[in-house]
Amino acid sequence: MAWFTFEPRWEPFREMEQLRRDMDRLWDQTYFPGRVRTRAGVFPPVNISQDNDHIYVRAELAGLQPQDLEITFQDNSLVLKGERKIPTEAKVLGYHRREREAGTFRRLIRLPERIDPGKVEAVFKDGILTISLAKPEEIKPKQIQIKSA
């Protein structure tokens, strides 16, 4: 009878990301004790998609209000800044797990194409920020008429 064992697939990039998080945490604990740090690329999580006319950025921002956010555009990059405030409990609790972090964040999102800065809309609903960025007319696909000779 043969025994088979399952070995999980080695994922070097996941291990490198975990090492980076561990090093960030060690650095913060050593040189900035008590500081809450939200790691770049982790909060807020974003999805970026596009069609022929727009680029869409959707950011998950549970627990925030529109007045807690600042959105700017410069050098073909979108910058999301804000602060997540989590109410502190009246008494000190012993957490089993604490994954929701409080503090300021700044997320720089490089856009895949140029946009028209005058045609940007942002809507915040149910904890999701949706930013619609219109592409300029000159980069939109255009159909070319074929003439018969």
Image (cartoon, rainbow, N blue to C red):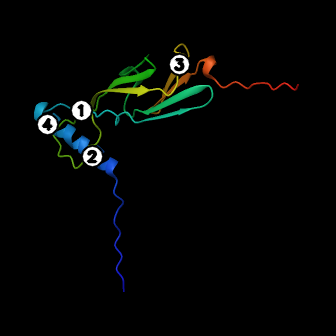
Label tally = 4
Mark 1 neighbour density, 10 Å: few (under 14) some (14–19) many (20 or more): some
Number of the front mark, 1 or 2? 2
Mark 1 and mark 2: span between their CA atoms? 16 Å
Mark 1 highlights which residue? 37
Badge 1 marks a residue whose secondary structure is loop
* Left or right, residue 148 beside residue 16: right
Mark 2 neighbour density, 10 Å: few (under 14) some (14–19) many (20 or more): few
Work out whether mark 2 precedes mark 3 in sequence or the reverse, and give the earlier one: 2
- Badge 4 vs badge 2, beta-carbon distance below 8 Å: no
Mark 2 and mark 3: span between their CA atoms? 36 Å
- Badge 3 vs badge 4, beta-carbon distance below 8 Å: no
Which numbered circle lies on residue 18? 2
Name the residue at the right extreme: 149
- Badge 1 vs badge 3, beta-carbon distance below 8 Å: no
Which numbered circle lies on residue 29? 4
The structure residue drawn at horizontal position 81% and vertical position 26%, both measured from the top left corner, is 146
